Amino acid sequence: MRKILTIAGSDSIGGAGIQADLKTFCALGVYGMSVITAVTAQNTRGVFDVRNMDESIIKEQIDCVFDDTDVDALKIGMVSTGSIIEVIASSLKKWKAQNIVLDPVMISKSGYYLLKTDAINVLKTKLMPLADILTPNIPEAELITGIKINGIDEMKKAAKMMVDMGANTVVVKGGHLINDAADVFYDGKELFIMPEDKINTKNTHGTGCTYSAAIASYLGKGFSEKEAVLNAKRYITTAIKNSLSIGKGVGPLGHLIDLYRRAGVDY
């Protein structure tokens, strides 16, 4: 069985972060492992508080995983501070980690800044060059590039800018577009659009976490970058279409919808 690692924050409502990643790994038939970078107090209505793990325990978690088993791929999610980013980058270099997906989690849907502004440049210089695939949404791509993104043309421009800044392959996610949910893929050579209709649901909690975890899963299973992204796009679209009305705000996705159906759950 392929083994995939998530380095991310914990979500107490279970729809994003570590919890979403592990559900995604399970759904896609890989073994999930985790390094927790932060504990958040959040629910479907927003993020209310964050406690970052200290750098030493983050390093020890990474060392323990890599020292004990092979890691076929990994994704990086919430990393709040420059010092945490430095520790992760150093550890991944030490262990020669491969198939790295970086989801630059910066702002929650409720507007809570999950990445300190002074850490953005550290992420750009330390983690972006290590990542095989970078998966920013539109607000994150705007923060990284400094340009305003209003549609597909600007998404293409931003993707090219991020590759010029040192990223290997970029997927700019279009979930924040008004009338569709197209993504833009660019690997320095090939640029293409992955069109998708906007799904009529408010329950999109954890979409970015889930998408990047799915990409890492497919990379770990031996798929090419393009194949991994296309397969992950299909998975996330199905999960959104089968999202769950849990909580009083933005509900989670149907990560394990096939399992629920087999169990006869009326969701």
Image (spheres, rainbow, N blue to C red):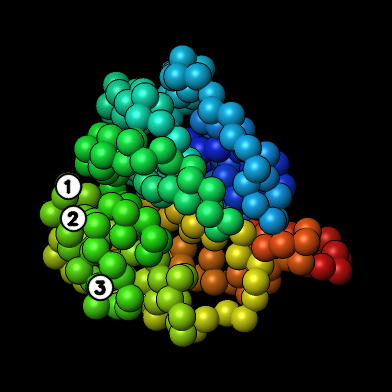
Report if residue 22 is visible in the image.
no
> Dot 1 corresponds to which residue?
166
Residue 118 to residue 222: above or below = above
Give the crowd class for mark 1: few <14, some 14-19, many >=20 residues within 10 Å.
some
Label 1: state its secondary structure. Answer: loop
Front residue of 257 and 123: 123
- Label of residue 163 in the image: 2
Q: Pointers 2 and 1 in contact (CB under 8 A)?
A: yes
Label 2: state its secondary structure. Answer: helix
Amino acid, disc 1: Gly
Return the x and y of residue 236 as percentages of the image width and height. Answer: 54, 66
The residue located at (46%, 14%) in the rendering is 56
- Label of residue 154 in the image: 3
The residue located at (32%, 26%) in the rendering is 86
Marks 3/1: CA–CA distance:
19 Å
Front residue of 187 and 123: 123
The residue located at (67%, 63%) in the rendering is 250
Give the crowd class for mark 2: few <14, some 14-19, many >=20 residues within 10 Å.
some
